[in-house]
Image (tube, rainbow, N blue to C red):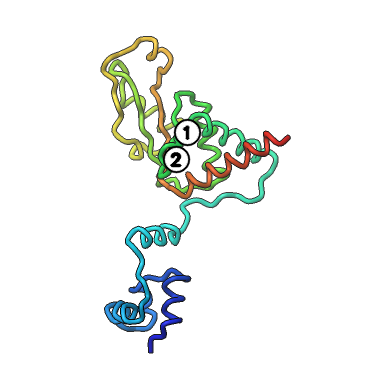
Amino acid sequence: MLDKEAVSKLYNKTGLSSSEIARKYNISVWRVISFMRRSGLKRRTPAETLRIQFYKKPLTFNKLRVLSSEQKKLLIAGLMLYWAEGSKASKYTVDFANSDEKMLLIFLKMLRGIYNVNEDKFRVYIYCFSNQDAGELIEFWSKKLDISKNKFTKPYIQKNINENKTDKMPFGLIHIRYSDMKLHKQIMTDIGIMGSKLLSN
């Protein structure tokens, strides 16, 4: 027997869908929807449903909560790098771009060592020039970053060569990408906390 208060709690507070409520009561989803309609229980909009589904998804990373002094240094270094060179425009993807090997490796070390990210979600994008061998660059960066070549997307090749830029970027420009809104939000939150602490000292 469906109860308005119980269904309202499951739907509005617990965040269950009408399908999940139906499974809980071992009845059809249409019976739940019909009951909600008769009881005056307002259903969620598609946008609200997507938001709830997003927050119910398990994290693809597991940030360390207790850090050693060396890990704290790594976290600060990685966050400072992202603050300066990372993408803030797209909240859906962590995107760090640079041509400096050490900067890329430090940022990766932070993601792997502090945030414990899922390696399968890494994607690497290379921006290079037409006088550079994109295949060789992928081979080079795959070994340096310890990321499989199948994680590299189709490179962008600049046909109008600027020799000065080629000299400055002999191995191209690298984007390390990790599509996860929650990780991007966590990193931006941590940058805000770090910035406030540094300014308060």
Binning the other alpha carbons within 10 Å of mark 2 as few (below 14), some (14 to 19) or many (20 upward) gives: many
Gap between marks 2 and 1 measured at Cα: 7 Å
Dot label at residue 56: none
Which residue is found at the position 31% from the left and 21% from the top?
133
Binning the other alpha carbons within 10 Å of mark 1 as few (below 14), some (14 to 19) or many (20 upward) gives: some
Q: Say what secondary structure mark 2 lies in.
A: strand
Q: Classify residue 191 as left or right of residue 40.
A: right
The quadrant the C terminus occupies is: top right
- Vertical order, 163 against 4 (above or below): above
Dot label at residue 94: 2
Judging depth in this view, the residue of 76 and 38 nearest the camera is 38
- Vertical order, 56 against 69 (above or below): below
- Vertical order, 128 against 93 (above or below): above
Dot label at residue 86: 1
Q: Residue furthest bottom?
A: 1
The quarter of the displayed image where residue 76 is located: top right
The quadrant the N terminus occupies is: bottom left
Residue 90 percent across, percent down from the top left: 40, 40
Which residue is found at the position 40% from the left and 25% from the top?
173
Residue 135 percent across, percent down from the top left: 31, 27
Residue 118 percent across, percent down from the top left: 46, 48
Q: Say what secondary structure mark 1 lies in.
A: loop
Which residue is found at the position 36% from the left and 25% from the top?
137
Residue 143 percent across, percent down from the top left: 43, 32
Q: Amino acid at mark 2?
A: Val
Judging depth in this view, the residue of 5 and 136 nearest the camera is 5
Mark 1 and mark 2 in contact (Cβ < 8 Å)?
Answer: yes
